[in-house]
Image (cartoon, grey):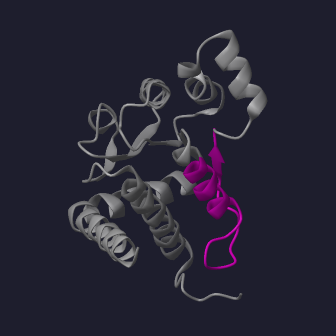
Amino acid sequence: MKFIISDCLKESIRAKEDFANREAENIIRLSENLVATIKNGGKLLVFGNGGSAADAQHIAAEFVNRFLIDRPPLPALALTTDTSILTSVGNDFSFEDVFAKQIAALGKKEDLALGISTSGNSPNVLKAIDVAKKMGLQTAALTGGNGGKLGAMADIVLNVPTDQTPHIQEVHLWVEHLLCQLVDTMLFGDSKNTDH
């Protein structure tokens, strides 16, 4: 059991280190795009399935409420939370449309659409990114493995170079927190100055 704990920890750390080394420039670029989106009156629209849906809600909450500092709420919306929309679209049309229809209804060209998919091949995430691009939104993706189809679609792709889904998800959560910290720092200064 102790070997499993140690091995799992080492693999998780390695995944984060490999990701950070490969994607540092894209992380900074996405942070800058998020800041520009906010300054231009746009919002973050974020979505994914399963654990990635939870991630979408998590990062949206960090933006709207707070991360490390008390600051004004930042505009972010997880497209994974309205069960009436998700179930009506899934029932009346297709589960593939559950995010795309929300992008079409709520998105504007000042917004940034962030799709999260560990495989990079989730059909509903791909369709939403496609709709977002056609509407003129900036697009970004968090992926894993070889990036899948999503890796070739989004304007900015942060890809975790492992096929281990748990480690991909761990890195996604880490970079989501990092994006919050970088955006806060760019907009408000020292993000390590906490009041709580």
Q: Is residue 177 left or right of residue 146?
A: right
Tally of numbered tags? 0
Q: Quadrant of residue 50?
A: top right
Can the viewer see residue 43?
no
Q: Quadrant of the C terminus?
A: bottom right
Can the viewer see residue 8?
yes
Q: Quadrant of residue 24?
A: bottom left
Going 27% across and 62% down the picture, which residue do you hit? 19
Q: Residue furthest top?
A: 92
Going 50% across and 76% down the picture, which residue do you hit? 185
Q: Is residue 81 above or below residue 129?
A: below
Q: Is residue 121 above or below residue 160?
A: above
Going 70% across and 88% down the picture, which residue do you hit? 195
Q: Position of residue 189 (x, y in %)?
A: 52, 81
Going 43% across and 23% down the picture, which residue do you hit? 134
17 or 109, which lies in front? 17
Is residue 154 highlighted in magenta?
no
Q: Is residue 129 left or right of residue 51?
A: left
Q: Quadrant of the N terminus?
A: bottom left
* Residue span colored magenta: 54-79
Q: Is residue 107 left or right of residue 136?
A: right
Q: Position of residue 113 (x, y in %)?
A: 50, 40
Q: Position of residue 10 (x, y in %)?
A: 30, 74
Q: Residue furthest front?
A: 1
Q: Is residue 98 above or below residue 119?
A: above
Q: Residue furthest right?
A: 84
